[in-house]
């Protein structure tokens, strides 16, 4: 059976996440449907990660398998012709039978966009925070996230999560126009982990949580969790992007906005 590696971008606003579900419209479901029409046969499809409802991707990766051979260029064009406008296959490559897009990934990059102003054009791709934020304090707190630690306090536990210990390679914040960008790089992530880290960092920026309190949350100090509900400050999905999935060591790319918001 031939297999292909797909690199995919999508606007997750209209979808109930990546993973296929009964009675729900999902990104993987749309891709499976489009590929099945091309091959006129059922296909195999698996992804590198499960983005939640409303979360976007700049570089999701999936493995597609079919009993019917196909040229990569023709396959990409045919699937894109069947897909809705908010899902796009960026690249199709031959893949080995044993390629596993989830287990073989060495790192995943997530990007979160916080807008400091109301925007008419990018509102689906940002979290507009009306309060003035102290970006220096947010950056200081963000740097504490890197390292190998138990992120149970920032996760919504799934039944199939075997461990809440994650090795975060890097976490950084920078300003781009009227956006505050947060990027986090790790081998994998827990459900809602990135959004809950972002929500807590925004509370640091608002002055409702100081950097030491944030550190205490990372260190799972009981008193910190008693004083602050991480779950209650989960950032909305609109600002979150799966930026890329890496399968070999690469230089860290520049941190840039997915959907810029010009500074006025």
Image (cartoon, rainbow, N blue to C red):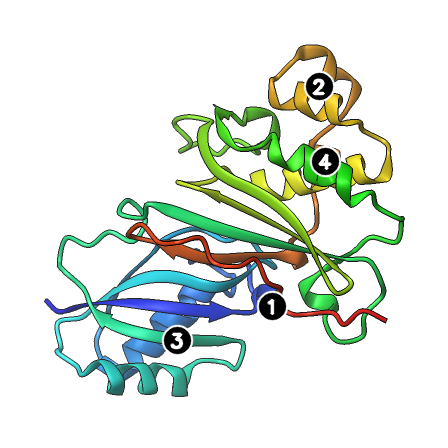
Residue 192 visible at all: no
Residue at position x 44%, y 64% from top? 59
CA distance separating discs 4 and 3: 34 Å
- Disc 4 designates what residue? 200
Residue 225 numbered mark, or none: 2
Residue at position x 61%, y 17% from top? 220
* Residue at the far left in the pictured view: 1
CA distance separating discs 4 and 1: 26 Å
Q: Residues within 10 Å of mark 1 (few under 14, many from 20)?
A: few
Disc 4 to disc 3: CB gap under 8 Å: no
Quarter of the figure with residue 142? top right
From the top left corner, tell me how far across and down residue 154 is, in percent. Answer: 60, 31
Q: Earlier in the sequence, mark 2 or mark 4?
A: 4
Q: Earlier in the sequence, mark 4 or mark 3?
A: 3
Eye-nearest disc, 3 or 1:
3
CA distance separating discs 2 and 1: 34 Å
- Disc 1 designates what residue? 14
From the top left corner, tell me how far across and down residue 89 is, in percent. Answer: 39, 75
């Amino acid at each position: 059976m031939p297999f292909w590696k797909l690199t995919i971008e999508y606007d997750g606003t209209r979808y109930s996440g990546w993973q296929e579900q009964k009675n729900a419209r999902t990104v993987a479901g749309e891709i499976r449907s489009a590929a099945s029409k091309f091959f006129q046969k059922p296909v195999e499809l698996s992804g590198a990660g499960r983005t939640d409802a409303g979360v976007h991707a700049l570089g999701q990766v999936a493995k597609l398998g079919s009993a019917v051979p196909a040229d990569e260029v023709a396959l990409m064009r045919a699937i894109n012709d069947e897909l809705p406008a908010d899902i796009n296959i960026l690249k199709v490559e031959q893949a080995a039978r044993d390629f596993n897009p989830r287990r073989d990934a060495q790192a995943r990059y997530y990007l979160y966009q916080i807008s400091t102003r109301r925007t008419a054009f990018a509102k689906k791709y940002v979290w507009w925070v009306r309060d003035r934020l102290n970006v220096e304090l947010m950056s200081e707190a963000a740097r504490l996230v890197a390292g190998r630690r138990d992120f149970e306090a920032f996760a919504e536990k799934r039944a199939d999560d075997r461990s809440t210990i994650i090795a975060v390679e890097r976490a950084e914040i920078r300003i781009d126009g009227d956006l505050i960008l947060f990027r986090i790089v790790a081998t994998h992530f827990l459900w809602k982990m990135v959004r809950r880290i972002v929500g807590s960092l925004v509370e640091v920026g608002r002055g409702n949580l100081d950097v030491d309190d944030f550190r205490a949350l990372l260190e799972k100090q009981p008193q910190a969790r008693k004083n602050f509900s991480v779950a209650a400050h989960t950032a909305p999905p609109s600002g979150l992007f799966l930026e890329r999935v890496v399968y070999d060591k690469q230089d860290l790319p520049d941190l840039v906005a997915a959907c810029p918001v010009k500074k006025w």
